Image (tube, grey):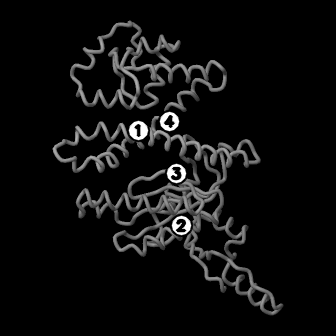
Amino acid sequence: MTVDDSGSGTDAQGADSGEDPLALRLEGLILGAERRYTPFQAARSAGVSMELASRFWRAMGFADIGQAKALTEADVLALRRLAGLVEAGLLSEAMAVQVARSTGQTTARLAEWQIDSFLEGLTEPPEPGMTRTEVTYPIVELLLPELEEFLVYVWRRQLAASAGRVVQVADDEEMVDRRLAVGFADLVGFTRLTRRMEEEELGELVEAFETTAADLVAANGGRLIKTLGDEVLYAADDAGTAAGIALRLIETMAHDETMPELRVGMAFGTVTTRMGDVFGTTVNLASRLTSIAPKDAVLVDTAFAEELIRTQDAPASEAEAAEEAAAAEKEGEEPPVYRFGLQPMWQRPVRGLGVVEPWLLTRRDRAP
């Protein structure tokens, strides 16, 4: 869409003349409607200004299309719904644009993956006597309703989980600025690998890493924030959960001979959440700790270590743990059981964050 209010435009045939017929058939199948409107006509039918319509369109991640007749009844309905939320006072205009942007960014990545990986895998090799192009349409026709229902199901599940976390927050301010444990897991020497490995082989390694990391994070109570090829960012509501995930990641990757070494950096503190991402000093500190962590090791900041000690997931020191064990044995009682061990490392300056004291996190045996 553009902000041109002239209302002029080419007819549908003129707009489509240079486009692939199969691409147009697939678009009609997926959208469930034919092209009927220019951007001006769509905005007018939805009862919104061209300026707002253009903001929504661009926020969803779509390029300007001039005044081609390329929009459908579904586009008009989407504009009308977003504008209706603003008119009803349920969303501000800025928030409505954020809704469009966050939804567009999330679904764009999903759609790219489904087409690049899922669909290509199903249509190669093609059926005897048919080209991949001829196979694509019926495959999409069969998959579309099932994928759509699954997408809505997962979205509702994620929405319920996120809403549940928010309503449990006691302080309203913590809904935006929350105290979380944040971790970065980074493949060591990935840049060197890119020079030695073939593109397909490198892609398979990255996919295997992301899949393994995502599964481990989710299964152990964390939330995957994003993947960056050779690095994943995750968060957890408590330090103990994040620590368990970090060590499990290290242990799992160490047993996979195809994977490079892994290093993890974690920090605990106030985090700003926005559009599914996390920001702030805590996140920056976790990233810096990752860059200085030894191979196959986990470094945490002082706040993270103190939180583990506070929740009795780790002893303040091994000497204290030994004293507790001796006292318990003398009284005929069971000694405290700590899940993790903490070893203070040398203080060092970290770019942009001053001097920090990293702690080496380890898994602790039941016996002190």
- Write the residue at 66% across / 22% down: 89
Q: Which-is-in-front pick, marks 2 and 4?
A: 4
Question: How far from the left and from the top, in percent, is residue 288?
Answer: 49, 59
Question: What is the three-letter code of the residue carrying label 2?
Answer: Ala
Question: How far from the left and from the top, in percent, is residue 182?
Answer: 57, 57
| Disc 2 residue crowd, few under 14, some 14–19, many 20+, Cα 10 Å | many
Q: Is residue 213 left or right of residue 339?
A: left
Question: What is the three-letter code of the residue carrying label 3?
Answer: Ile
- Write the residue at 39% across / 12% down: 4
10 over 179 or under it: above or below: above
- Nearer to me, 154 or 287: 154
Q: Which residue is mark 2?
A: 246
Q: Secondary structure at mark 1?
A: helix
Q: Which residue is mark 4?
A: 103
Q: Which residue is mark 3?
A: 225
Q: Which-is-in-front pick, marks 1 and 2?
A: 1
| Disc 1 residue crowd, few under 14, some 14–19, many 20+, Cα 10 Å | some
Question: What is the three-letter code of the residue carrying label 4?
Answer: Thr
| Cα distance between the residues tagged 4 and 3 | 15 Å
